[in-house]
Image (cartoon, rainbow, N blue to C red):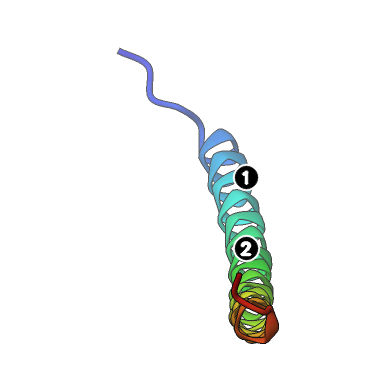
Amino acid sequence: MAFPSDDRLQLELEGLKRTLEWTEIQQEQLLDRLDLLRLENTRLQDRVEELVRQVEGLKQQQPLF
């Protein structure tokens, strides 16, 4: 039974380290994007509430026949 050489193991280890580093970078980018989406969602919810209030105000101003 042949065992992988130390050089091959070292290369695999280095590859795994780079993969981990890249994964951590991607995770940070995704967390940043999530934060931005949450802020945008809050802004849009506030805008919807504002528009609903405006519609209610307009409904109250209409004369009833």
Q: Relative to the observer, which residue lies in front, 27 or 19?
A: 27
Residue 32: x and y, percent? 66, 74
Above or below 16: residue 64: below
User: In what quadrant of the picture does the N terminus appear?
Assistant: top left
Quarter the C terminus occupies: bottom right
What is the C-alpha distance between the residues marked 2 and 1? 22 Å
Residue depicted at 60% across the width and 84% down the height? 60
The numbered mark at residue 15 is 1
The single residue placed furthest to the top in the displayed view is 1
User: Residue 27: horizontal and vertical position, in percent?
Assistant: 58, 63
| Tag 2: amino acid | Leu
Is the residue under label 1 in contact with that under label 2 (CB below 8 Å)? no
In this view of the protein, which residue sits in the foreground, 57 or 39?
A: 57
Task: Provide the residue designation for mark 2.
Answer: 30
Task: In this rendered view, identify the residue nearer to me: 6 or 47.
Answer: 47
Side (left or right) of 33 relative to 23: right
Instruction: Tell me which corner region of the image, top left, top right, bottom left or bottom right, holds residue 15.
Output: top right
Secondary-structure class at tag 2: helix
